[in-house]
């Protein structure tokens, strides 16, 4: 039974996967399993995993494509540990990420989530210092202090938690009943929302312990429609949740902005049925109170 389960999802892309895996096997904390959840089933991906000759690396090829949300879910459900973390197939960890972020959960059952800050890197793996500082400010991590977060629900207002590559969480504390393919590329935001709505402790480590790659074709290259729809779904759930009433006004504004963006995307794709659906949601949202 590994202490930590790492889930890395991939789909027909091995360009950076070797670097991602190497950053895992180089961790100073070595009691883990790495589940490489392959949604494309490429032989190249399997051969790459085998080339490390490390029994902690498990290549899992889906018999049919599941999509990012359900491929992630399948990996989480396959995990043998209750302490789980993600690593995108194009990102990297520094050597002591697990030692800093996983050990708090292993030492204290009251902690449901621990996360750190992260670097931005370019396609060649070079750290982007100015962009990293701006990213830390944009997502509000510059205002956080080390240790337990006083009001965790407020982290959702600015999406402060980099769940996809810089957070460790307790799987049993996530409410999976509302999780479905609807969350799409916003699976990380859903998991953060579900964890924060509970009363468990959240820990912040104000160090840049991971590296998030920005490149053409990456998640940060553009705001894809599926990710936008997934995030709108998550924010819609938050708006209905009384645990987040203290940030309802901020979430509502973000939700409306997402729906407006979806109207534009659907019109550009001549998807008029979806356009009407999102217009209807905007009309309804405009009638909601901020409280």
Image (tube, rainbow, N blue to C red):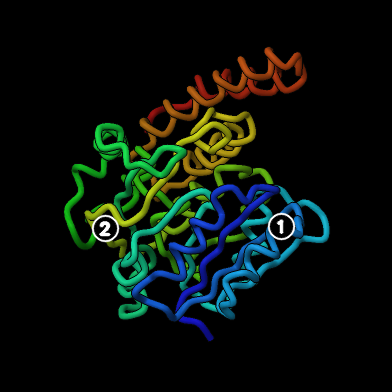
- Is 33 displayed left or right of 156 in the figure? right
Please state the horizontal and vertical placement of residue 31, each as a whole percent of the image: 44, 81
In the figure, 208 relative to 49: above or below? above
- 119 or 165, nearer to the observer: 119
Please state the horizontal and vertical placement of residue 258, each as a whole percent of the image: 52, 26
Please state the horizontal and vertical placement of residue 193, each as a whole percent of the image: 45, 50
Q: What element carries label 2?
A: strand
| C-alpha gap between disc 1 and disc 2 | 37 Å
Q: What element carries label 1?
A: helix
In the figure, 201 relative to 118: above or below? below
Is residue 105 in sight in this rendering? yes
- Is 70 displayed left or right of 218 in the figure? right
- 128 or 177, nearer to the observer: 128
Q: Residue at x 48, y 26 (%)?
A: 288
Is residue 245 in sight in this rendering? no
Instruction: Find disc 2 in the rendering and name its residue.
Output: 204
Question: Which comes sooner in the sequence, label 1 or label 2?
Answer: 1
Quarter of the rendering containing residue 195: bottom left
Instruction: Find disc 1 in the rendering and name its residue.
Output: 44
């Amino acid at each position: 039974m590994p202490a930590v389960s790492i889930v890395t999802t991939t789909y027909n892309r091995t360009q950076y996967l070797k670097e991602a895996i190497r950053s895992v096997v180089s961790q100073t904390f070595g009691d883990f399993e790495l589940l490489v959840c392959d949604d494309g089933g490429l032989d190249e991906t399997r051969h790459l995993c085998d080339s490390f000759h490390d029994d902690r690396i498990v290549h899992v090829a889906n018999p049919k494509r599941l999509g990012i949300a359900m491929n992630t879910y399948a990996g989480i459900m396959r995990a043998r540990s209750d302490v789980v973390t993600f690593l995108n197939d194009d990102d990297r960890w520094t050597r002591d990420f697990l030692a800093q972020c996983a050990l708090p959960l292993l030492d204290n059952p009251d902690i449901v989530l621990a996360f750190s800050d992260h670097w931005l890197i370019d396609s060649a793996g070079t750290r982007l210092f100015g962009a990293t500082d701006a990213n830390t400010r944009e997502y509000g991590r510059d205002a956080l202090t080390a240790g337990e977060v006083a009001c965790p629900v407020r982290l959702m207002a600015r999406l402060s938690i980099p769940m996809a590559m810089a957070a460790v969480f307790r799987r049993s504390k996530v409410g999976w009943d509302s999780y479905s393919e609807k969350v799409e590329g916003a699976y990380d935001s859903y998991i953060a929302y579900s964890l924060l709505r509970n009363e468990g402790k959240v820990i912040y480590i104000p160090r840049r312990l991971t590296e998030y790659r920005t490149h053409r074709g990456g998640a940060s290259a553009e705001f894809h429609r599926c990710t936008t729809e997934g995030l709108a779904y998550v924010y819609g759930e938050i708006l209905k949740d009384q645990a987040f009433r203290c940030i309802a006004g901020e979430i509502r504004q973000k939700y409306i902005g997402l729906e407006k963006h979806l109207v534009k995307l659907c019109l550009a794709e001549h998807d008029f049925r979806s356009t009407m659906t999102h217009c209807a949601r905007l009309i309804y949202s405009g009638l909601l109170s901020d409280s």
